[in-house]
Structure formats: C-alpha cells, structure tokens
Image (spheres, grey):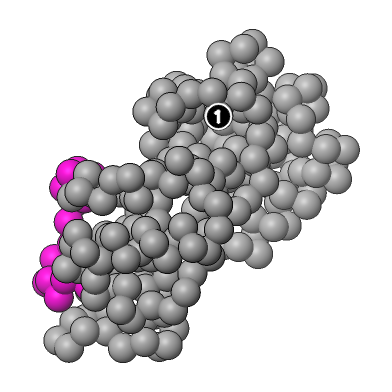
Amino acid sequence: MNIRDGKDIDGARSALAAIDPALAVANAATPPIEWRTRLGGFSGLVKMVVEQQVSVAAAAAIWRRLEEGLGGVTPDAILARDEAALKLFGLSGPKARYAQAIAEAQLSGQVDLQRLGALDDDAAVAALTAIKGVGRWTAETYLMFCEGRFDMFPAGDVALQEALRMAEGSATRLSEKALYVRAQEWRPYRGVAAHLLWAYYGAIKRGEIAAPPSIVVA
C-alpha cells in the first residue's frame, strides 16, 4: 500500500489509536502530520548512506561536493573513482566502499533501484540488505520515504523506541526485536505509526507538547 493523501494518514492514525493505547496517547497529543518524501533511485540510496552518523550540515556539504565533483551521482560516476578519490569529497572510507557496492549492485543487475516497486515489502528489504553497507534500518527507511510504502517500520530506530516508551509511561524502552513484534499489531499501517511516533517524540523534545507525567525525556 502506498500513501496517497492526508485522509489516508488521518484514517490510519485513528485505526492505530484504536489498536494500541500507547499510540492513542501519541495520536491525541500530536498535530496533523505529513508523509516524509525523499529522492529515490540510486542517488537517493547513496545519499541516505552519506547522511548516516553525521550532522545535517555536514551531510549536506559532503553531498554537495559529491554531486559537483562527479557531475551527478550515478553508478558509472561512482565507479570511475577509487576509494581515495571518493574520500576527497568528504566520504569516509567505509561510506566510499558502500557507495561503490551500491553502484556495482545496480550495474550488475543484483538490484534495480528503479524497479523495487515490483517487489513486495519483505523481498524489497531483502534485496536492499543484500548490498554491502545497506542495513535493515536503511532499507526500511528508504522504502518508506523514497517509495512511500505504508507498512514499513524501522524498529531499530532509537527515537521510535523512545517515543513509544514515553507514550506508554514506561521506565524502559523496548528492544529492537521486541518492537518489531509489537509493531506486528499495527499492520498494515506501520509506516504511519512510525511517522506518528517520530512526530510525537520531536514535539516533546522541542517543548511543543508535554511529556506524560513522571516521564524523563532522554
């Protein structure tokens, strides 16, 4: 299922609130949300890898240098440079190798990033995580943001774990494994649950809404 408009999100939020009391708390406190969208395809996946574990400003600067230096982020352009050359644009050694692995996967036909829509969610995650440097979180967020898949849930995301902890009024947050199990109850709206929890967590962190009583905001 792909996201279509705000009515889909509102309807999914109501369904989620009826399923899970913690999501009901988050839903009641959180203003309307929009589905996040991002550039997809080869450059979109490489950009996600570039952005990991660096600040927003640093990621933007590295991406700008990469685009300008390569004349466009394409598989051929990436593979035309060795690791040392890619590092000159600001990529770390591992990220340079991951970009090359994504390029090789695309050109070899191991994965076609323009045709992932032909695969179901599980098969698409498996295809992406078969590429060196693409973990489950990256695969799930790529499919959610770049393809608008409605039922993805990156349970390894600490902000999602923390948001659910606060909504439940719990002292501890669920592990990644436990949160994947919990999120099964939210099918087929797990992507909306993720957006809702991110929005809830962000609003609390910014002081726009109050955290539940006795909850410590990490």
> 91 or 161, which lies in front?
161
**Picture quarter with the C terminus:** bottom left
> 181 or 72, which lies in front?
181
Which image quadrant is residue 197 in?
bottom left
Image location of residue 84, percent across then percent down: 71, 31
Magenta segment boundaries in residue numbering:
167-181
On whether residue 172 falls in the magenta region, the answer is: yes
Q: Is residue 92 visible?
A: no
Please tell me which residue is depicted at 42% across the width and 88% down the height of the picture: 208
Please tell me which residue is depicted at 31% across the width and 88% down the height of the picture: 210
Please tell me which residue is depicted at 85% across the width and 45% down the height of the picture: 68
Q: Is residue 33 left or right of residue 96?
A: left
Image location of residue 110, percent across then percent down: 56, 14
> 35 or 174, which lies in front?
35
Image location of residue 56, percent across then percent down: 60, 63
Q: Is residue 75 above or below residue 58?
A: above
What SS does tag 1 mark?
helix
Q: Amino acid at mark 1?
A: Gly
On whether residue 70 falls in the magenta region, the answer is: no
Q: Is residue 62 left or right of residue 166?
A: right
Image location of residue 96, percent across then percent down: 63, 34
Q: Is residue 54 left or right of residue 173?
A: right
> 105 or 63, which lies in front?
105
The residue that disc 1 covers is: 117
Q: Tell me the crowding category of disc 1: few under 14, some 14 to 19, or many 20 or more residues within 10 angstroms, Cα based.
A: few
Which image quadrant is residue 57 in?
bottom right
* Count of marks placed on residues: 1
